[in-house]
Structure formats: C-alpha cells, structure tokens
Image: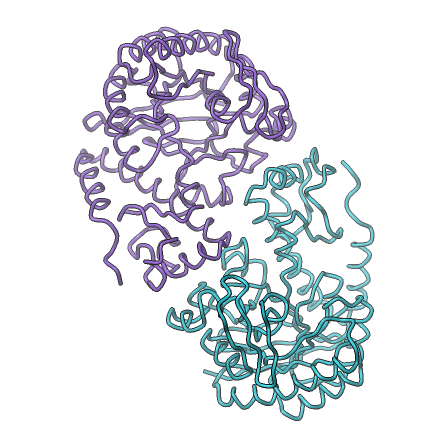
Chain colours: A cyan, B purple
Amino acid sequence: MTSFSFTLSHTDGAARRGLIGTVRGEINTPAFMPVGTVGTVKGLYPEQVRETGADILLGNTYHLMLRPGAEQVAKLGGLHNFMDWQRPILTDSGGFQVMSLAKLRKLTEKGVTFRSHIDGSQYELTPERSIEIQTLLDSDIIMQLDECIALPAERKEMERAMELSLRWAQRSKDAFNSQGHRALFGIVQGGDDLELRSRSATGLKSIGFDGYAVGGLAVGEPQETMFRVLSGITPELPTDRPRYLMGVGKPDDILGGIERGIDMFDCVHPTRAGRHGHAYTRFGVLNFKNARHRDDPRPIDENSPNPNCRRFSRAYLHHLMRTEEMLGAMILSQVNLAYYQELCSGARASIEAGTFTDYAAQTRAGWAAGDLPPN
Amino acid sequence: MTSFSFTLSHTDGAARRGLIGTVRGEINTPAFMPVGTVGTVKGLYPEQVRETGADILLGNTYHLMLRPGAEQVAKLGGLHNFMDWQRPILTDSGGFQVMSLAKLRKLTEKGVTFRSHIDGSQYELTPERSIEIQTLLDSDIIMQLDECIALPAERKEMERAMELSLRWAQRSKDAFNSQGHRALFGIVQGGDDLELRSRSATGLKSIGFDGYAVGGLAVGEPQETMFRVLSGITPELPTDRPRYLMGVGKPDDILGGIERGIDMFDCVHPTRAGRHGHAYTRFGVLNFKNARHRDDPRPIDENSPNPNCRRFSRAYLHHLMRTEEMLGAMILSQVNLAYYQELCSGARASIEAGTFTDYAAQTRAGWAAGDLPPN
C-alpha cells in the first residue's frame, strides 16, 4: 500500500498536466469527476462510467450519511464495494449539501446540526465527524468540512466563514492524523475577495494538505468573477499538490479552470442536463426536447469517438425525450459524461504538446459555431 | 433474402423445441420476446437486451403509430434502425392497446376509430391499416388485427368478437398478400369457450398463416382457465407453424405455456416488475423494496449466470429502490429479462434432452422453496 502522490509532468501557461497516484489507481489531470451522489452515477452502470474515461468518482457525504448511512456502507465493505466501483473515490465533506438541502440548520463553532430533508431526522456534522464518515465510506480523497456561503455576500460574512473554515481545516487535519493511504484536501474559502482568499490559502498551506480545493465558487456569481478569483488564487497554491475546483461546472467553466491552473473538477451538471434532454458536444449544447431534431436522421456527431453519438439518430433521441423513456436519460447522461472526459483528455494531450492555447481556442470556436445546419 | 421458416426439431410431451428463420436472424423456441413498447425496452440498451439472450423483440403498433408515427419510423429507416436493434422484431396489431388505452373507441365491421390517450387526436385502425403500419415499421412478424375482449364474458360476446376477428383475419391475409420476407400470424380468439376457440382455429387454418397466436388470454381469467384453453387449443394448431401466446406472462405462466405446446411469449411484466423493485429468480420473486434486504451483503444469486445477479449486494439494490435511483430499475429490469431468457433456454435444453418434465418440476420446486434464509 503506497501513499497518495501527485506528479506534475507538464505545464503550458498556467495549465497543468499531472498524475495523481492512489492505492486504487491513477488519476490523470486535468480530471473531471462524475458525481455518484448516493452511491450511483445516475443512469449509468459503473463500467459505463469508466468507459467514458473517468478515473475517479465523487460521492456525496451528506446523501450517503442519510441513506444508507456511513456505518451501513462500512459494514457493506465501503463505498467502492457497495457500488462496485473499484477505482478512486473522492468524497465531499457534506457541508455544501447541508447548507443547500438540509432543514433547520444550526451552525456553531463546533459544527452544524440539521434535519434530513427526507425524513426530518436530526444529525450533527462536525469536522471530526465528517472525517469519520468519509473514512467509513473508505474514501480515497477526503475533504475538510468548510462553510460555503452563497455569493454575493458581505465581506464581513465572507471573512467569518473563511476563518471558521480555516479553524475547521486545522481540526480536520488533527482528526485525519495517520489515515494511511488516504489523502486530505483543504478548501480555500473567502468568497470573491482576493485578500480573504489569499489569507485562506496561507492558512491552509501552513497546516499542510495533500491537495487544495477552491470552494465557494459557482454559487451564484458571474463566470468572470469565478475566473478572476481563480486567476488570483491558483498562483498562491503549492505547485506540487493537486488543485480542485469544487462543483464546477459547464464545459466552458472547466476549460477556463484548466487555463487558470486547476487540476480537478466535479459537477452533477452533465448527468442532470442529460436527464433533461441536453447533450454537450463539440457543437455546443443540443436540446433534444426541441422539435428541431424531430425529423433529423443524423446522429449527434458522426465523428465522435463515443459510439452513442454515432449510432442513434437525433430523431430517435427526440422521440425518447418526448416519450419520457429512461433510455433517453441514460444515453444523454452517458453522452455528456463522455464529452466532459473528451474535453479533459484533449486538454491533457494539448498541455503535453504545449498547444493548450490552440486547443482551447479551437474548442471555443466549435462551441461558438454551434450545431450542424438543419438537415 | 430468404423467406420465413419454422423447423420443429424436438418434442417432449406437448413441449416443443424449434427454430424460426427470418432474414434478420434465427429465433430459438420456446422464445420469450421482451417488449420494446415505443421503440425501446425500458431501461436497457439494445445490446444489453441481446446479452440477456433475446433473439427477438416486440414492438407495439398502437404506441408507435401515436409516437413517432409509422410513416415517421419508415422515413427514419424502419424500427430496427430507429432503435438500433438489427435482429427480428414482431409487432402486434395495435388492437389490444386500442381496447385498453385509447379513448372514445368506436368499433365497426370496418375497424376501430379512437382518440389517442396522449393528446386526444383521432385515428382509425382497420385490418388493412394495421398491416400497412406494421409494414412501415418494417416488422419481421406481423399480427392480424383482432378484437380482444376481457374475461369473464358472455358466450354471445365471445362469439361475436371471435367471428369479427376471423373476418379481419381474412382481410389481413388479403392485405398482406406478397409482403416478401415478412410473416403474418393469425390470432385464435373465442374467450374461455373451447368450441369457439376450435372454430376460430379451423377458420384461421383454412385462411393459412405463417404462425398462429393465441390471443384473448391473460385478460382477467384465473391461470387454470388459461391453461385449460391452451391444453384444448394447441392440439388443433398446425405442428409445422410457430404458436405464440400473446401478452403472457409471469415465469410460471410461461412454463405452463411451454408444457402445453406454446413456442413464443411476450410480456411487459419483467421490465415493469423490475422498475417496481421485483426480481424474478430461481428462488421465486424477491421484493427489493422490502427492508428484509437492507443489511444483506449477499448478491441476488451467487450462482446465477447473470453478472448483475452476482456483483451487487441485496443491500445495494434495496438502497437503489429506496432512493428511487434509475440504476435500480435498470439492474432489476435486466435481471428479470435475463431470468426469463434463462427459463426459456433451460426449457429448450431439457426438451432436446427429453427431460422437460424434470426441468419443469425442479424449476417449480425452486420457486416453491423460496428465497435464501435471512443472512
């Protein structure tokens, strides 16, 4: 059993190509992590997720602590065995969903108490309990508990949440102490204020983590704000540790994140959008609920490396959405996850070749050109 | 392009082992046909359906004529290309769903007019139009339009519907004339009255069909009534043509049908039951919504040939049903379709070996013994 590692092999501007080592396999970065909310990536078998190119999944501590419960997952052999995904898993701390989903939240220095949005039962989440839960889940990459606030926010509020998150970071590190092969990531907070972000990064670095996440973005702010914060903060993060932009995003958010030195991303968007009939492609986003596709015998993209983009007609996909058939959600969730992986693998190859700027420009030009002309 | 064929290779009592030849591939009988209602077998990709062992699918004329429309499917290359299933497809006539789903039905000698249950638009279905639609769908096995009534029913009503179905059988045959490689099946009606059933069979035989279906069963009557009708009618059907029991059923219905000389079956039950958390197995039916499975680390059946029955714990399947995750419906639909195919392939092998009686007895004993004892 070796420990967690990160090797930065190439840089191209701020963009980075790296390799994370874990006992459950390697993670090529920049990496997109599909979200397996409650122990399943919605609409795909685990091997289908892997076939899209995913090296790692994300599991949600909040959802899993409610159902089936962390101790239950541990009894059943941990999250990898529970869902039959034997590759790396990163778990979040639960904090974000507590703030967005749970009822009757009460935040104190100690942690947060809340009631389940499902059955109202009461839970407590502290930095220590979050580490314990993530360890019970047998997570490979554990996130510290933080307080994530929505933007825009008052500076005073951003500062308070950042400082609380920093104290929780220290408690997380103390609780995590000697977890063997697992990694622990700290989370930079501070809203859209670069001075606060910088203080957060400095504090986290002095505690010392295996990786550094940027939290509290994609929480209501414009993309340019997110990019401004990223551009400001990534130069302050250690170059020899992976950087993870939490909960982001759409393909152009990811491309912009890679451009600013981010190594890891996660988002429910590709599977959620797929269930709603949207397909992300090199032509941009297509909406298969739209009657534009009704009579179109062409596939999504005959030149895609993804078989699902070549085998089914647009008319068929429109039909599946119109009839609300499960297969429509299954196919488009897979199509989106595969496109996100294609985007990241293209980024990795171009960073290796020193052509990332061209790659990003061509990718954006493809999106801007839009879909094929009507048949 | 060769024509439709049927070869009866073995019999064991009334049970039959045969092979149907079509231009799109062979169908081993006894065969179970998964139902791809509106151009998809709910919850499975086409290749996953094939991997369960299915040689042929059923498509529903009623659903497809409403959405996306028969002419639309034809424009898009036929149903096989539309859904990317290149093996044989049998289509029903649409009559059964018109009677069970459509609004404002009006039945005349000519046919039936009705309004769509989806948007209220008006349609007419006649024997000739049903043949035309099924041809537009590019079906390999076409069913005559018939009138299917619920049981119990008055003899007079059963007789009227049977005689109308017989006149529609003749019109279907006339309309079908010279359809090349396709096959046309007639449908025996007559309710639970063997004299009516016999008259129906005699009439159909004198018209001459490529196969003979038994319709109007599994429409409210007890299983013993269905079996009595089957035992009475199959000896009157030509031995050199396939026999198809429409819309049946649960595994014990299928076993009883094979015992009485039926070659083909179809039913939505395995996928519908899967979506509701039920798994058909050699132990009988398991309900994964039941808390009995909550803590059970064992798979459905560690000795099953189906990987899905071996890889996921019962606790995980319970969790997926409890959280209403798509993957639960996907897995259990696949598990049920695979079990139905296993049941039929076991029947085929035992008929070849002359041991079908033992096979049926052992299968029933397994169901009766029930599930594994609690863990």
Determine the residue positioned at 62% across, 57% down. A337
Whole-percent x and y of residue A311? 60, 43
Which of these two is toward me, B160 or B132? B160
For residue B368, side relative to residue A81 (left or right): left
Determine the residue positioned at 68% across, 65% down. A344
Q: Quadrant of the C terminus of chain B?
A: bottom left
Figure quadrant of residue B293: bottom left
Q: Is residue B302 above or below residue A218?
A: above
Q: Is residue A237 above or below residue A104?
A: below
Q: Can residue A17 be seen in this snapshot?
A: no
Q: Is residue B18 above or below residue A367?
A: above
Q: Can residue B97 be seen in this snapshot?
A: yes
Whole-percent x and y of residue B321? 44, 54
Identity of the residue furthest to the bottom in this view: A206
Whole-percent x and y of residue B47? 49, 44
Figure disc tally: 0
Determine the residue positioned at 49% across, 89% down. A178
Figure quadrant of residue A213: bottom right
Whole-percent x and y of residue A310? 63, 45
